[in-house]
Amino acid sequence: MSAWVLPDHIADVLPSEARHIEEIRRDLLDMARCYGYELVMPPLIEHLESLLSGTGQALDLQTFKLVDQLSGRMMGLRADCTPQVARIDAHLLNRAGVTRLCYCGPVVHTRPSGPHATREPLQFGAELYGHTGLEADLEILTLALDSLKAARVDNISVDLADARIVQAVLQGVQLPAAEMATLHAALAAKDASELKSLTRNSPVATSQALQDLVTLYGDVRVLDEAEARLPALPAIRDALVHLRWLASHLDGAIASFDLADLRGYAYYSGARFSMYAPGASDSLARGGRYDEVGSVFGRNRPAVGFSLDIKAVAAVAVELPLRAAIRSPWAEGADLRLAIAALRRQGETVVCVLPGHESEVDEFHCDRELISVAGQWVVKAV
């Protein structure tokens, strides 16, 4: 195999795509700052027991593991930043009130999430700690929407669910861990026959509620159906009220509901959402409430957040036109160097043409040039 061939689902990012991704990254960080979120930069690698604390088997299987040559301890390359940010909130900041944090950096996965997905996403996310109310859920939901809009993603739709609904239906169901995982998978796949088989020894009401759940997806009318068909449990009633309230504040975004959606169920403890756009093969952003995320770090306080892969967003976002640049000759004269420096301080891109390369392709769309007129360097349109 050639030395320059990269592993499957790992790719170099070339100049035009890198520019597009970097513009989106800056726009997302600016949007988070507008909402009052502070930037943190957790490490790419850390001790495995810390990295995987409380995350469940799914993240364990997605994590590359290696031995630290200094300590001999097992280490991992992060597959998700959320546990790290929870650790920062719990142990390093340890604030009493509300904390808003955001992050942006690469994560690495042992397996791709889909046929065309990268194993090295560039993850951006925001977390809000310390508030139990729906106001925090709405803030994160709105920030996620505004982030995709800032990245120039159009026609966004939002799919809403709530982990408490399935948890309430399954309360009291005694199944081995493997069978419970199969049941969760059957719910996500809407496999009614598998659900019936798995719950054959469960109470009739539970089995029927699970059968109903796989049909409860669609527009806001689903919430009315759920209220009529699902058990009248307080947790289910509260979840439906909360979902209706959140959907009413989406400011024109298309809302749908899938009450059996269990993606990321190991994380979520309340309302959760996924955001989609035309052209994307999967959701572009995912988030929700996960109040238990900090418990393994000794500080179990309310938490809600979202994350997205900037590379996936870039694939469907409208690309900005290339900013025009200025072409300049190369010369040793101090007057030219001063003229170039002054233009760059003004934010202009000035590309110096090196000797012998005057006819090469213009990668920066130089629509102006720096020329000498009567002993003065001036910018003229090409």
Image (spheres, helix red, strand yellow):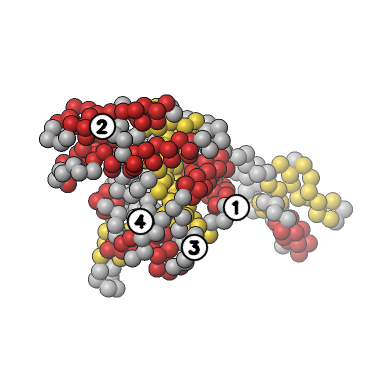
Q: Amino acid at mark 1?
A: Cys
- Disc 1 versus disc 2: nearer the observer: 2
Q: Which residue is mark 3?
A: 97
Q: Could you tell me which secondary element the residue under label 3 belongs to? A: loop
Residue behind mark 2: 209
Mark sitting earlier along the chain (2/4): 2
Closest to the observer: 30 or 314? Answer: 30
Badge nearest the viewer, 3 or 1: 3
Q: CA distance from mark 3 to mark 1?
A: 19 Å
Q: Amino acid at mark 3?
A: Gly
Q: Which residue is mark 4?
A: 293
Near-viewer residue (382 or 44):
44
Image check: 186 left or right of 119? left
Q: Is residue 299 above or below residue 219?
A: below
Residue 63 showing in the rendered view:
no
Earlier sequence position, callout 1 versus callout 4: 1
| Residue located 27% across and 48% down the image | 58
* Front tag of 2 and 4: 2
